[in-house]
Image: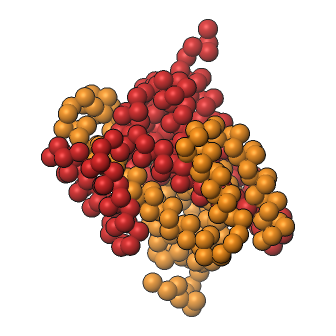
């Protein structure tokens, strides 16, 4: 009955995701949502959106949304297992590649791999925005905040924390 | 701040310096660690030139897994081998993981509080907007090239994983080889 432990589920899903997250943690969010909400039923849509929000306002790399999901599923052990599973395989791979990469700096196959993966990871990140918008924007006002934030962030260099603070205040007043 | 070519090259970081450098950057790096890492490594400590940094980071970006995490491994291994990679990685992840576990515990205690729920609703809506703006900025050079296969590949990836909810591994296994082949044939 070992398979019943949620730790195995966390380790398995995130270790696999680690090697498929081309474009980083932000590109893997649709898959995290699919697994956590639709397949494993670890949490609701609302909770997933909350965790995305918490991980974005918390310091550190975006990947810590995985730590939060792990904590929600199985406490501190879950948090550590999920983080190690998400970072372990890709780190070992990065370590291995880093040692030989400089030698092939100008090899045509290396350049093809690198530029071929750019549009893929961009599409995945756009899909992430789409999926999180689906769970986060449940009202017209919320969708308006998303659009306004996108425009301000695209055209200005305002510190994102101000945008988060404004959006939190609007939410707090109950306008969403 | 331009990088002065006359600057005396700094001596390579020790393991302890590596740990504290990444631990500091991880805690101050709200909304993305990368700009802070660049500032520390290139401008303040001068451990790498701007060009070296770009190369190391572009490698970390195309590797699978979290980009900044990969970068800590690539950077750490260059200056301290396996030990350097481990130390940089633990420095980068340690403090944020402790902080987020505390926040997770608070959320599981107070997550049902209406006021917190409302504030988080606002923040998640804004966070999506921020993500969308970042994607748009990164996509600009892709669309400037006119008729090209790259936007098409990006579009396929978007539709498959976004609206269609297809599992990421399958989409990648199908799409990545095609995209790499196209990059090889029509760069």
* Picture coordinates of residue A43, whole percent (x, y): 43, 27
Q: Which of the image's four quarters has the N terminus of chain B?
A: bottom left
Q: Nearer the viewer, residue B72 or A125?
A: A125
Figure chain in orange: B
Which quadrant of the structure image shows residue A176?
A: top left
What residue lies at 54% left-to-right and 66% top-to-bottom? B138
In this picture, residue A19 sits left or right of residue B10: right
In this picture, residue B9 sits left or right of residue A116: left
Name chain A's colour.
red
Residue placed farthest to the bottom in the image? B6
Residue placed farthest to the left in the image? A173
What residue lies at 29% left-to-right and 48% top-to-bottom? A140
Residue placed farthest to the top in the image? A1
Q: How many marks?
A: 0
Q: Nearer the viewer, residue B166 or A96?
A: B166
Q: Which of the image's four quarters has the C terminus of chain B?
A: bottom right
In this picture, residue B124 sits left or right of residue A12: left
Q: How is the image coloured?
A: by chain
* Picture coordinates of residue A64, whole percent (x, y): 46, 44
What residue lies at 45% left-to-right and 66% top-to-bottom? B36
* Picture coordinates of residue B103, whole percent (x, y): 33, 38
Asked whether the viewer can see residue A99, the reply is no
* Picture coordinates of residue A40, whole percent (x, y): 53, 24
Asked whether the viewer can see residue A154, the reply is yes
In this picture, residue A57 sits left or right of residue A21: left
What residue lies at 78% left-to-right and 59% top-to-bottom? B180
Q: Is residue B127 above or below residue B21?
A: above
């Amino acid at each position: 009955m070992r398979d019943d432990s949620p730790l195995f589920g966390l380790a398995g899903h995130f270790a696999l995701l680690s090697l498929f997250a081309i474009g980083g943690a932000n590109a893997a969010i649709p898959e995290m949502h699919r697994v956590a909400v639709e397949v494993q039923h670890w949490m609701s849509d609302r909770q997933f959106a909350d965790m995305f929000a918490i991980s974005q306002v918390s310091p550190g790399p975006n990947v810590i949304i995985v730590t939060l999901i792990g904590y929600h599923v199985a406490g501190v052990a879950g948090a550590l297992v999920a983080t190690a599973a998400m970072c372990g395989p890709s780190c070992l791979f990065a370590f291995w590649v880093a040692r030989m990469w400089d030698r092939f700096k100008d090899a045509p196959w290396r350049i093809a791999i690198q530029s071929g993966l750019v549009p893929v990871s961009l599409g995945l990140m756009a899909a992430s925005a789409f999926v999180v918008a689906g769970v986060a924007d449940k009202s017209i006002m919320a969708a308006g905040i998303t659009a306004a934030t996108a425009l301000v962030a695209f055209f200005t260099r305002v510190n994102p924390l101000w945008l988060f603070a404004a959006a939190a205040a609007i939410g707090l007043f109950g306008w969403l | 701040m331009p990088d002065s070519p006359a600057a005396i090259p700094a001596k390579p970081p020790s393991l302890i310096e590596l740990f504290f450098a990444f631990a500091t950057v991880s805690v101050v790096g709200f909304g993305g660690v990368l700009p802070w890492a660049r500032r520390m490594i290139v401008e303040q400590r001068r451990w790498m030139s701007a060009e070296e940094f770009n190369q190391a980071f572009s490698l970390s970006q195309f590797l699978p897994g979290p980009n900044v995490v990969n970068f800590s491994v690539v950077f750490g291994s260059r200056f301290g081998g396996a030990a350097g990679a481990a130390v940089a990685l633990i420095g980068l992840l340690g403090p944020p993981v402790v902080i987020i576990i505390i926040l997770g515990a608070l959320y599981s205690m107070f997550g049902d509080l209406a006021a917190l729920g409302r504030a988080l609703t606002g923040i998640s809506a804004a966070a999506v907007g921020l993500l969308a703006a970042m994607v748009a900025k990164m996509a600009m050079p892709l669309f400037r090239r006119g008729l090209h296969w790259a936007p098409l590949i990006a579009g396929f990836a978007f539709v498959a994983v976004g609206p269609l909810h297809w599992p990421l591994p399958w989409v990648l296994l199908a799409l990545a080889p095609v995209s790499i082949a196209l990059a090889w044939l029509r760069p």
